[in-house]
């Protein structure tokens, strides 16, 4: 009778202790997931990550305007007939003219700011 009672007591204690241990494990998952989302397995909270805003250096096709250049325009002389006879006179004086050479496109490294964003993780584990 003592053997039967002691084995029954051991069985009851084993069942009771295993149920409280599993209850503690369940409680630890629910309480820790509320405090630390990274330890939470699966779900919406752990499936996205915030990437803060930052600068990146990228290659872009950029239009480069042409340079300005000063060009001398020669004076204009003509033969004119007047009351004093035929003379060689200056019709238009020479002057400097500023012209812009044609521009072109080229690839340049440009520093660009990227806004912060949420991105999805590859897996929810």
Image: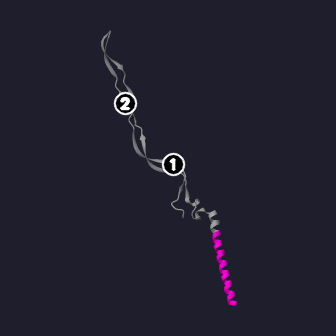
Q: Is residue 11 magenta?
A: yes
Residue 109 versus residue 87 in the image, above or below: below
Provide residue 77's location: percent of width, then percent of height: 32, 20
Provide residue 73's location: percent of width, then percent of height: 35, 26
Label 1 vs 2, first from the N-terminus: 2
Q: Which residue appears at 65% of the width and 72% of the height?
A: 23
SS state under label 2: strand
Principal secondary structure, stretch drawn in magenta: helix
> Which label number is shown at residue 71?
2
Q: Nearer the viewer, residue 19 or 63?
A: 19
Residue placed furthest toward the top? 83
Residue 104 versus residue 37 in the image, above or below: above
Q: Residues within 10 Å of mark 1 (few under 14, many from 20)?
A: few
Q: Which residue appears at 39% of the width and 28% of the height?
A: 97
Residue 64 versus residue 53 in the image, above or below: above
Provide residue 113's location: percent of width, then percent of height: 51, 48
| Residue 51 found in image quarter | bottom right
- What's drawn in magenta, residue-wise? 1-27
Q: Which residue appears at 42% of the width and 40% of the height?
A: 63
Cβ atoms under marks 1 and 2 closer than 8 Å: no
Q: Nearer the viewer, residue 17 or 113?
A: 17
Q: Nearer the viewer, residue 89 or 66?
A: 66
Q: Residues within 10 Å of mark 2 (few under 14, many from 20)?
A: few
| Residue 25 found in image quarter | bottom right
Q: CA distance from mark 1 to mark 2?
A: 41 Å
Q: Nearer the viewer, residue 3 or 73?
A: 3
Q: Which quadrant of the figure contains the N terminus?
A: bottom right
SS state under label 1: strand
Residue designated by label 1: 113
């Amino acid at each position: 009778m003592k053997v039967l009672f002691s084995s029954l007591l051991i069985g009851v204690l084993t069942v009771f202790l295993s149920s409280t241990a599993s209850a503690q494990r369940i409680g630890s998952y629910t309480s820790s997931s509320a405090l630390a989302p990274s330890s939470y397995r699966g779900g919406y909270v752990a499936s996205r990550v915030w990437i803060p805003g930052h600068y990146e250096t990228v290659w872009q096709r950029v239009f480069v305007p042409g340079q300005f250049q000063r060009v001398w325009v020669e004076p204009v002389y003509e033969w004119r007939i007047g009351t004093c006879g035929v003379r060689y006179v200056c019709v238009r004086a020479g002057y400097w003219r500023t012209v812009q050479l044609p521009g072109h496109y080229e690839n340049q490294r440009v520093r660009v700011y990227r806004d912060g964003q949420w991105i999805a993780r590859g897996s929810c584990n």
